[in-house]
Image (cartoon, helix red, strand yellow):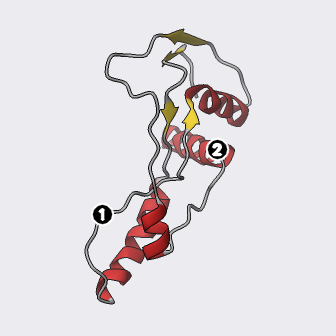
């Protein structure tokens, strides 16, 4: 759970969230593709869209069921205004589709993971 204020740099910056289990699942599919004679290549795993930092913060508050303080600040030098993983090629070649395609589901699963880590 978030206890200290969260610092946000540049509210227009997009946050990219990708779940580890989705990557691991795709890894197994990629091995099958290669074993079947597919060519080695580079693929982006992503949702094809980004979420604003504020949208992610709101989703965390909903998933946690509590409010917390957020302090706004300027974007740091070098921070991109927007970053989105283009996943058209992996979708076309490997048939990959994200399992959790909504921000609320992504954040809920990530928060659940963090809570389990705190219990161990």
Q: Is residue 102 left or right of residue 22?
A: right
The relative height of residue 108 versus residue 65 in the rendered view (above or below) is: below
**Which residue matches tag 2?**
103
User: In the shown orientation, is residue 46 left or right of residue 115?
Assistant: left
| First along the sequence among labels 1 and 2 | 1
Q: Residue furthest bottom?
A: 36
Residue bearing the label numbered 1: 42
Marks 1 and 2, Cα distance to the nearest angstrom?
25 Å
Q: Residue 108, how many percent across, how many down?
A: 64, 44
Q: Which residue is at the front of the view, 115 or 101?
A: 101
In the picture, which quadrant includes the N terminus?
top right
Question: Do the CB atoms of the residues marked 1 and 2 lie less than 8 Å apart?
Answer: no
Q: Position of residue 18 (x, y in %)?
A: 48, 49
Q: Eyeballing the image, is 8 above or below 115? A: above
Kindly identify the residue that appears in the image at 61 percent across and 27 percent down: 57
| Residue 47 spot, x, y in % from top left | 54, 53
Q: SS class of the residue under badge 1?
A: loop
Q: Residue at x 46, y 33 (%)?
A: 82
Q: Nearer the viewer, mark 1 or mark 2?
A: 1
Crowdedness of circle 2 by 10 Å Cα count: few (<14), some, many (20+)? Answer: some
């Amino acid at each position: 759970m978030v206890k200290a204020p969260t610092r946000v740099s540049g509210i227009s910056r997009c946050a990219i969230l990708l779940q580890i289990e989705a990557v691991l699942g795709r890894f197994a599919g990629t091995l099958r593709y290669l074993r079947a004679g597919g060519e080695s290549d580079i693929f982006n795993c992503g949702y094809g869209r980004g979420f604003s930092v504020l949208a992610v913060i709101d989703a965390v508050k909903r998933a946690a069921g509590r409010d917390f303080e957020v302090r706004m600040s300027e974007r740091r030098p070098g921070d991109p205004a927007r970053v989105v993983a283009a996943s058209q090629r992996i979708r076309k070649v490997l048939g990959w589709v994200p399992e959790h395609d909504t921000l609320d589901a992504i954040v809920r699963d990530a928060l659940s993971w963090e809570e389990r880590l705190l219990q161990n």
